[in-house]
Image (cartoon, grey):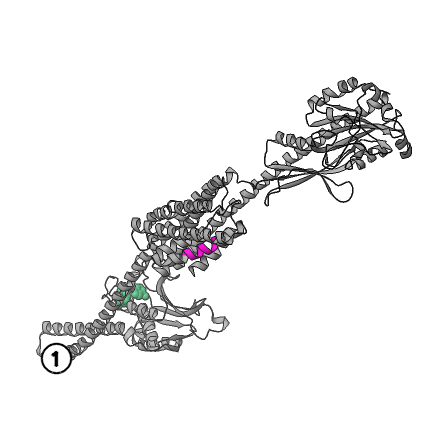
Amino acid sequence: MLSAAYLVLGWVSGQLGIPPGYASAVWPPAGIAVAAAILWGPAAWPGIALGSGLLNSWLSLHATPGEPTLAVVAGALVGLGAAAQAGVAARMVARRLGTGNPLDRGQDVVLLLLLAGPVASLLNSTWSVAVLTLLGRLQPGQQLGNWLTWWVGDSIGVMLFTPMLLAWMAYPRHLWRRRWREVAGPLLLAAIAVVGTFVASSQQAELARRATFEAQANAAAGVIERELDRSIAFTESTARLFSAMTTVPESDFSEFVDPWLRVNPTIRALVWAPVVRSSTPPATASGATEAGRLSFYERDSGGHKLGVQPRALYVPVYYSEPQPLNAGAIGFDVASDPELADTLARARDSGEPSLSPEVTFNLTQTHERGVLVVAPVYTTTVTPPSVAERRAELRGYVLCAVRLGDLAASALQRSGRDDIALGVFDTTEGPISTVWTANTPRSADGMYTSTPVTLAGRRWVIDAWTTTPSSEAGAGWLLLAAGLGFSGLIAAFVLDAGARATRIELLVALRTAALAQSNEALRRSNLDLKRFAHVASHDMREPLRTIASFAELLTLEQAHRLDLTGRDHLNRILAAARRMQALVNNLLDLARVDSRAVPLAPVPLNSSVDAALENLHASIVECGARIEVGRLPVALADRVQMVQVFQNLLANGLEYRRPDVPPVLRVGARHTPTGWEIAVQDNGAGIERRHRERIFEMFERLQRDGRPPGRGVGLATCRSIVERHGGRIWVEAAPSGGSVFKFTLPGAHSPLPESDLEYAVP
Ligand code: ADP
């Protein structure tokens, strides 16, 4: 599986390789290998070696096709290097940081990244470049570039991908897995950014290189075109010299052409070759007698001199400059050269200078190759108008031999580049023919451009191409270095944040657990307390009843035997016992809120209020209270407890009335988004704001002048009940003075008819 992961990732990254090499800008497999070596130790080594070996064999084969055995050997050796590098990285990490997951400790992450990344990556980059060089898979001069890319690529791969994998496997796994996306996301983004920037800048550099190349190639083509143009123009001028004069002495000829030849070293020869018709005896040919040196010759295909074949027309070289280089050329019959026949005919018939294809300079003795510019000279000063007349009036030719190869070389020399080659092709007549071409082949991944030019009526294209693969520019390395730093920073930051977040999450989990524990303890102690209250009050009822009944019995049967003080004492005992009984009953009520609770069922709250009023009947009559009850909903509630709540609230309303003001109590309900809100309003003394919270606490009561203090259990019981029903209870000041106690019951049943949705009681 490891090998497969290595292969797949490697193939993808191989696409990012920098030509002309093997190494890649970001090499994730190196990161995977290190993570695997850290996690599984030596067990991971064979997988790494296999994956890397296969991948590199394939890459090596791909880079240099042929020699498959050598490619596999190279791949295998590189694979061993990859496994060794991962092993060394893991060992170093283990030695410096101890075993276990290093991600848990923020500052260790940086050390991990440095050791496993740039430090360990020195190993395989050095080893592999050495191996590839020894096996001849890397050309000399490519080492440094490949080594650097290799090293940076592995380093970035480790810094971005090792943490990603370690985070996936880190402990506590559930925390890290959840965090994985936070770690992997930025790292992947960083990888994409590095690769993207690199690719973009490589493309930019490639474009720039192409632009430079094209400019230089165009310049070279321009030089060739200009030089040839000038040669054509000069050949034409020389031809005009002959048209204008019946005889041109050799000294005039050399005087005319030598200055030109001196400044144009690529011109091999400038020649005057007159037409000699066979009817004219050679000895009487123009100028021949003065020179007395004309002996015609031809050359065979091997370049050997031969005597001329009998022909109707000869075109022997008569003058040829520069001398003495071209002395041997005198007498060569240009018309005998089959390579030139076409060009001569074209020049003669068109009356214009004509360019030959690449020919051997038979008219010189050197047999160099190049192109000839051929300008016709007629016996008339102006070019005869028809082809027939031109043929009849032809007097000779001026020929100019241009060493195109030298011209091309000098054109390229000006661009200062030795990796560009040129070729000149003629496209005038359908099929393309080579005029001249450098014999350096085009490099497979080199650049190429083609410039069309028109010269002496010929359509040429001048092709330029690079002969060596493009070498990476310096900016690429700078960029890689920046990528390395950037990846390291991102990785360190993300992992440190990850480690921190994990620690915090662990801490939160611990605290939450502790809190849950103490909550549970609190709940249990509350329960214990309620149980205790219940048991205590329950067990007190019996002795209390005994005290009360015996005190009553004493009052009934023995009171007459006691004096006034004794009777008073007896009454106090009786009163105290009754108060005590009430308190115990209240406490029992409170304790039973949970223990005696029955499942909630729909309860019409109006019936609960009625039952409470029934229980309070005596008090109501006694104080002349007025009670108004609106329409209340049917609530999901505990029937007995609802009576308790209303009874407590109504009893307090009667109890804490204002002196001399007959109590008015109102009960109503209001629908809220979450359920029902029930209100019990009085016109009593009211409660100061600062006491409104604490009266709901157990045994909290307010001291009031001239009144026996309450027991402080009623409201606590109400709160306990309301909260058991999922509601809330509080008190507000009533608008008309007095207090209004409100409590909520969530999701109460049976909504009232529309008209009753407000408080039934104002
Ligand atoms: P108790 O009435 O037995 O003292 P409660 O828990 O019912 O205990 O009430 C606590 C305190 O709240 C009372 O002592 C009283 O001072 C105050 N209180 C309760 N209801 C009212 C009310 N309707 N108007 C004014 N004060 C009230």
Residue 616 or residue 162, whichever sits in front: 162
Q: Main secondary structure of the magenta part?
A: helix
Residue at 32% x, 57% y: name it. Answer: 506
Q: Is residue 16 above or below residue 669?
A: above
Residue at 40% x, 52% y: name it. Answer: 80
Image location (x, y in percent) of residue 203: 56, 43
Residue 422 or residue 474, whichever sits in front: 422
Q: Which residues are magenta?
A: 48-56
State which image quarter holds ligand 1: bottom left
Residue 357 or residue 141, whichever sits in front: 357
Amino acid carrying label 1: it is Leu
Image location (x, y in percent) of residue 646: 34, 72
Farthest-out residue, bottom: 557
Q: Quadrant of the N terminus?
A: bottom left
Q: Which residue is mark 1?
A: 554
Is disc 1 placed on a helix, strand or loop? helix
